Amino acid sequence: MALDHAPGSHVPGQHPDDIAIIGWAQTPMVRHTDKTETQLLLEVVTDALDDAGLTRADVGFTCAGSCDYVAGQAFSFVQNTDAIGAWPPKRDSHVEMDGAWALYEAYVRLLMGDEVDVALAMGSGRSSTADPALIYPMEMDPFYLAPLGADALSLAALQAQAVLAAGAVTERQLAEIAARCRRDAQSNPYAQVSGEFDVDELLAEDAVRAPLRRHDLPPITDGAAAVVIARAEKAKAVCENPVWITGIAHCAELHYPGMRDLTRSLSARKAAEAAGVADGPVDVAELQAAFTHEEPLLVEALGLAPTVTVNPSGGPLAANPIMATGLVRIAEAAAAIRDRGASRTVGHSTSGPCLQQNLVCVLEGGRA
C-alpha cells in the first residue's frame, strides 16, 4: 500500500499514521553456527532496540518470520519468543515467511493505532543444518512438484534458462553481476562471501545445475535480523533520523512455474506499482536476487533506472540467511538513507518458486 496522497505532496512524518524504521540489527552471516535461532534472535533483538534507544518494555507488538522446515522442528517459532522475553506481556504473531513479511504485518498492526506505537519484526534461519535439496521440495505442493524433487536450485535453473533463451541477458552478464555483488560486499562487515573475481575465470567453471554455475548461486547461510518500527509521534520522539516507510505492498502469482511466463515477474511489477516505486527517483535498491538471473528480472519489473545502485551490500549473493534475507534487504535500504545519505530507497523480498511472491518497500528520509 502507498500512502493516500499525490506523489511528492506529502512530507513523511507529518501524518499520525506515518510509520518509520527507527532501529535494526543483523548477525554476522556465516556458513554455520552452533547457536540456536533463539540465541541469534536474542542478539539482534537486543541490538536493534539499542539502536532505536528503546527497551523490550517499549515494544507493543512483535512478529517473527521463520520456517519449521529449515529449523527441522514443528512449531519452532514458539521457542524463539524467548528472544523477546515474557515480561511485560505483549501482542505477538508469526509468519511462515521471510521476516520481511513479519515487518509487513507489524506495519499493518501499527496502522490500527490502538495503543501500540512500537513494533518489532524479526527473521531467522539456519540452512546449514540439513541439505536444502531435500528440505525445500517438501514445501512444494504435494501432488505435482514435491514428487519431482523440485528444489530451489532446479527451479531457478529452469527460470535462468528461460531468461537466457529469451535473449534478455547473457551468461557473461550474469557472471558480471556475481563479480560486482561480491566486490561490493567487501565493504559489508556482515557479508559471508566477498572478494575480487575474474569474470572469464567464473565462466570457465562447470555448471552446478545448467545453466547456473557456482557463482550464480547464493551461499548457504546461518543468520538473523530484527527491525524496529514506530508510529510518527513516537518515531520523532526517540529517533533523530527516522526512515519513513512511504509504500509497502505484496503480490503473488500462481504457484506452478509452468503456468507463468518465467521471463517476467508480474507480481514484482504489481507490488512495485502498489508501493509507489515510480512516484520518485530511487537512489538504492536492495533486491532479494538470490540467483544472478533474478536481478535483471527484478530491475525490469520494478522499473528501476540504470542510475539506481543495486545491492551495494552485496545482496543475497554475499549472504543468504533463509527467512531473514528479505528483512536484511529492508534494513540495508534503511541504512543507505540514515547512514550513507541516500534520499529514497527500495527494499525487496521474494518467496516461492521462481519469484512467485514479491514484497516491495519504499523508504524515504525526512525532508526539510
Image: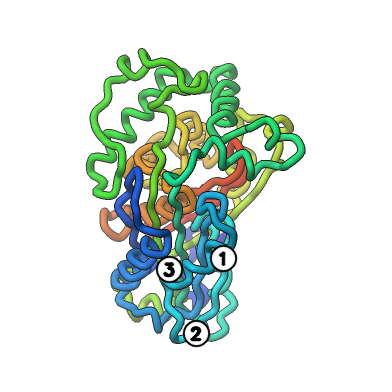
Of the two numbered discs 2 and 3 on the same chain, state the one appearing first in sequence.
3
The dot on residue 164 is none
Q: Position of residue 208 (x, y in %)?
A: 46, 22
Q: CA distance from mark 2 to mark 3?
A: 23 Å
Q: In this rendering, is residue 12 above or below 334?
A: below
Q: Residues within 10 Å of mark 2 (few under 14, many from 20)?
A: few
Residue 89 tag number: 2
Please indicate whether residue 272 sits to the left or right of residue 127 in the image: right
- First reached walking from the N terminus: tag 1 or tag 2: 2
- 11 with respect to 352 (left or right): left
- Separation of marks 1 and 2 at Cα, in angstroms: 16 Å
Marks 2 and 3: CB-CB under 8 Å?
no
The residue located at (36%, 29%) in the rendering is 178
Percent coordinates x, y for residue 88 in the rendering: 45, 86
| Residue type at tag 3 | Ala
- Label 1, on which residue? 94
